[in-house]
Image (spheres, coloured by chain):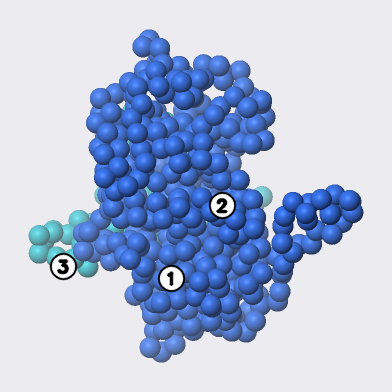
Chain colours: A cyan, B blue
Amino acid sequence: MLLIYCPYCEEERSELEFRGAGDAHIARPENIADITDEEFEEYFFLRQNPKGLIFERWRHIHGCGRFFNAARDTVSDRFYTTYKAGEPKPDVSDILQSEQNKGAAK
Amino acid sequence: MRKYSVFAVAREALRGHKGWGPHWASPEPRKEYDAIIIGGGGHGLGAAYYLAKEHGITNVAVLEKGWIGGGNTGRNTTIIRSNYLYEESMDIYEHSLKLWENLSHDLNYNVMYSPRGVMMLSHNIHDQQSFKRHINANRLYGIDNEWLTPEQAKAYCPPLDIAKTARYPINGAALQRRGGTARHDAVAWGYARAASDRGVHIIQNCEVTGIRRDETGRVVGVDTNRGYIGAKKVGISAAGHTSVLMQMADVRVPLQSQPLQALVSEPLKPIFPCVVMSNSVHAYISQSDKGEFVIGAGTDQYNSYSQTGGLQIITHTLDAICELFPMFRRVKMMRQWGGIVDVTQDRSPIQGVTPVPGLFLNAGWGTGGFKATPGSAHLFAHLIAKGEPHRLAAGLTLERFRTGRLIDEAAAAAVAH
């Protein structure tokens, strides 16, 4: 079971309190009625599904009820960081760099 | 290939079983093949076998990153059934079920297909309406599926608790008698042996690291950790790692990779005669021929390639099993593991051509790929050989996510995903 840090409650809580909500930073097209089928497919169905660093949404459904974003590794399942909805995507190279430094410190 | 028979067993018994050779050859890869299949699971090995057997294409390699039987083919709960709702699904799963019925004979390898019946428990009025809709759709399409009262369900599967006071009361069940189980390792090994016998190269510990295309965009071969291997046709049948491979060809696919867990108990005397599934409480159980209870749990809610999963997922399933079958409460669980399944949004598979000429895709079987092994493999071979889908797989295209012609087993599925 994952332990997830809610950036609103500022606490690490068990996964049971959270609901996974798919990829983060996907903007719904503002002209949704006008876009082509290809654009809709791109927005609605196609996903990166990365092996490694993923940016995803979680909802603290049995806590504060709020959505937030997380950067996690899909191989180790370890969270690099969580951050509030609306905040910009953290810099990927910063995350990976700090992970490498941690590895070296061990 | 030495033919397996009762006489071969008797002969070897007298010779101390020293004459059994390896099931399949392990050749060095050639520089060029007519077709390469990435992924040495049941689907990939089966496709290679049918390419050789039915289409006369024997210059084929199956590239497996790990070892044969080490992926999802060896990690599932071996359930076979074909009682899906939509015609596209019924077509392919019923095609598969018909192939299962004669597979041991066809491969000269005992895959231990056991049509012991798959019973799905109905716990409430919604289950009942949904199951009866399935039953009617199936029967109209010529697929067996029948409704049982709680008493009939109990008679078919005596360990079941049908008390009205039960935590999960049962108001009936849907039974597909031709459904059942097969020995998953034997399916992989049997296909590998039969394909190898027909000249297919099975190359283990060979991870694909790139998909090469020429200036027109057509596939010309793959880079692997054992060097470049050329092929004009490449089929991807790699389950959870499909997205990773498709990215090598710059194609995004509507797939999410998630862990799916299973576990087995200590072996017990034969006591459980069929397969029982419950969608509402999410539990599957059957008893293997070794006597272990084979139990399937749900997927985790997040994407992962970790081949493990959360403990709360399996305890949730075991809670349900203990309520449905109170006599199992003291049974000890022996092993637990996870596999990475590739799930589409409509919970139906994708089999078809891709935007890259020469690159074919067989993916998205999600939590139910084992039952489809022979049918999927048979139709995938047709796709690779002819360059266009077989009639029975014509609806499973990648384009359906653009056209909107989804096959929405997500809403109709027997299991709440």
Q: How far apart are marks 3 and 1 (CA)?
A: 32 Å
Give, as a three-letter code, the residue at label 2.
Thr
Instruction: Judge if badges 3 and 2 mark residues of a common chain.
Output: no
First in sequence: mark 2 vs mark 1: 2
Q: Quadrant of residue B92?
A: bottom left
Give, as a three-letter code, the residue at label 3.
Thr
Q: Is residue B337 left or right of residue B54?
A: right
Identified at 37% across, 41% down, the residue is: B144
Query: Quick one: label 2, few (<14), some, or many (20+) residues within 10 Å?
Result: many
Looking at the picture, does residue B216 appear above or below residue B327?
A: below
Which residue in the protein does label 2 denote?
A: B73
Q: Which of B139 and B40 is in front in this view?
A: B139
Q: Distance between the residues labelled 2 and 1?
A: 21 Å
Mark nearer the viewer, 3 or 2: 2
Query: Quick one: label 3, few (<14), some, or many (20+) residues within 10 Å?
Result: few
Q: Which of B127 and B101 is in front in this view?
A: B101
Identified at 41% across, 71% down, the residue is: B383
Which residue in the protein does label 3 denote?
A: A36
SS category of the residue bearing label 3:
loop
Query: Quick one: label 1, few (<14), some, or many (20+) residues within 10 Å?
Result: many
SS category of the residue bearing label 2:
helix
Which residue in the protein does label 1 denote?
A: B382
Chain ID at mark 3: A
Q: How far apart are marks 3 and 2 (CA)?
A: 39 Å
User: Residue B281, image x and y in percent?
Assistant: 39, 28
Looking at the picture, does residue B267 appear above or below residue B403?
A: above
Q: Quadrant of residue A31?
A: bottom left
Q: Are marks 2 and 1 in contact (CB under 8 Å)?
A: no
